[in-house]
Image: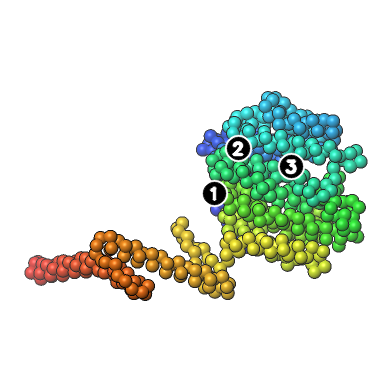
Amino acid sequence: MELRALINFAIWRDTRDITDVTELPTTFYNRPTMQKCWKYLDLTSRSFARVVKELEGDLARTVCIFYLVLRALDTVEDDMTIPNSTKLPLLRALHTKLYEPGWTFTESKERDRIVLDEFDNIQAEFAQLDPKYQAVIADICKKMGAGMADFAALATPEQPVAEVNSIADYDLYCHYVAGLVGEGLSGIFAASGKERAFIADQLTLSNSMGLLLQKTNIFRDLHEDVLEGRGFWPRAIWAKHGFNSMKELIDPAREKEALWASSEMVLDALRHATDALDYMTLLKSQSVFNFVSIPAVMAIATLERTFMNPKMLKGNVKIRRGEMVRLIMRSTNPRDVSYIFREFARMIHAKVHKDDPNLLKLSIACGKIEQWTEHHYPSFIQIAGASGQMASSIDPTTNDARAALFSRIALEAQEAAKKARQEKMLAELRAQGLIKERVGTEEEKARWAAQAEADQATPWLMIISVVVGMLALMGGLGSIIVWIILKYSD
């Protein structure tokens, strides 16, 4: 199935070519500074770049600049070689550099330092954006920079990365580095007109979308972060399992306790799943939906792949490319995405160990995803169609008790509609003076109404009979004429 998906994806996937002449009015790939920005996007985000380019119209270019601005902030925060005396003021003031032509920062040693070394190109393209987009990007940059600075200020020479203690601290940190990204994207989507204006006000749902993705990345990158001296897992989770530092989590001798801690990290990430599903039901643009849904299904798939998996304590666990392509091809509407979430929630639940301290909580978290899916998209209702025409029906093989209830409600609705039509017919006939009010039981009134409806239909039956008779007469006469011509003519 994965091989088939890869072949179909390679042959039939209609990808947007930002270098195409017809796309230049919105992508501006022919402008030197924008061409460099597209290159920075490819260099700094090999996976995210693809979904950005698929956004329609000028959204792709706008989100590209938004991403690069935040990548510059993130690079400053991640660089442990920059002293706090330089880092903190820079984080708090980077949003002002968006309005300072020619500004660059060349003191970074980070892998993605090109976005700082050549920030002047990003700033030049930011200045070309519509003011409505500039306002959103600058506001998010300011909030994120201030939040990052607050956390960076807690660092010490002995502890280069500030330790996250409580779950509340963890949520706040993830809000600054990812939740604000979700809020900014919602603001951009609304400003573009591709989505409805109220999307910009969905701050809780936008934040949850960002937190689901960020917490998945933090969980998956445990081994790499520990080796590089970073640690974002909250102490409130790993300390309760007897660890004194995050370095002990990757100790092979303590694998069992580390897996219990990792289980609780997955539990914490899963609490944002239903909010993410709610957010996706609000989107109307297909390209925007794909942009949001693809990372979301990758996140839930990653949580399942790394859940109770000892390999994640020793390295980076990834989804197979074929599996990733299958998920991309399925993530085209809220119903299918919710079914994907349900599938992986069931798989996570099946892997919960009976001795897991969070056994009950994990079961509830997975059950909430199942409940959300069944509430919004009941599995006993089938949806099928062709040529753009879709229809729903009840699965005849289902054992779901709700199916019988649904059928009864539908039948009652049909009867009520029929009765309403009959009453309307009687009212019209009374208004025309064709019938007088008759006193009788409800059953008699219903019978009279049905008779009136049948009588009303009688003239149409007569007209149809006359038309059919005339057509038959004309056909018969025509046949006689043809026979005479064939009989007596050479």
Q: Is residue 93 above or below residue 246?
A: above
Secondary structure at numbered mark 3: helix
Q: What residue did someone put label 1 on? A: 284
Q: Amino acid at mark 1?
A: Lys
Q: Quadrant for the N terminus, please.
A: bottom right
Measured as percent of width and height from the top left, residue 24 is found at 55, 35
Mark 2, mark 1: which one is toward the viewer?
Answer: 1
Q: Is residue 90 visible?
A: yes
Q: Amino acid at mark 2?
A: Arg
Q: Which mark is residue 134?
A: none
Measured as percent of width and height from the top left, residue 348 is found at 72, 63
Along the viewing direction, whichever of 6 and 480 lies nearer the viewer: 480
Q: What residue did someone put label 2 on? A: 61
Q: What residue did someone put label 3 on? A: 176
Secondary structure at numbered mark 2: helix
Measured as percent of width and height from the top left, residue 94 is found at 73, 31
Image point (46%, 69%), residue name: 412
Q: CA distance from mark 3 to mark 1?
A: 27 Å
Along the viewing direction, whichever of 196 and 306 lies nearer the viewer: 196
Secondary structure at numbered mark 1: loop
Measured as percent of width and height from the top left, residue 280 is found at 60, 52
Q: Is residue 440 above or below residue 335?
A: below
Query: Can you tell which quarter of the image residue 381 is in?
Result: bottom right
Q: How many marks?
A: 3
Q: Amino acid at mark 3?
A: Tyr
Q: Quadrant for the C terminus, please.
A: bottom left
- Residue 166 is left or right of residue 207, and the answer is right
Crowdedness near tag 1: few (<14), some (14–19) or many (≥20) residues, C-alpha within 10 Å: few
Q: CA distance from mark 3 to mark 2?
A: 23 Å
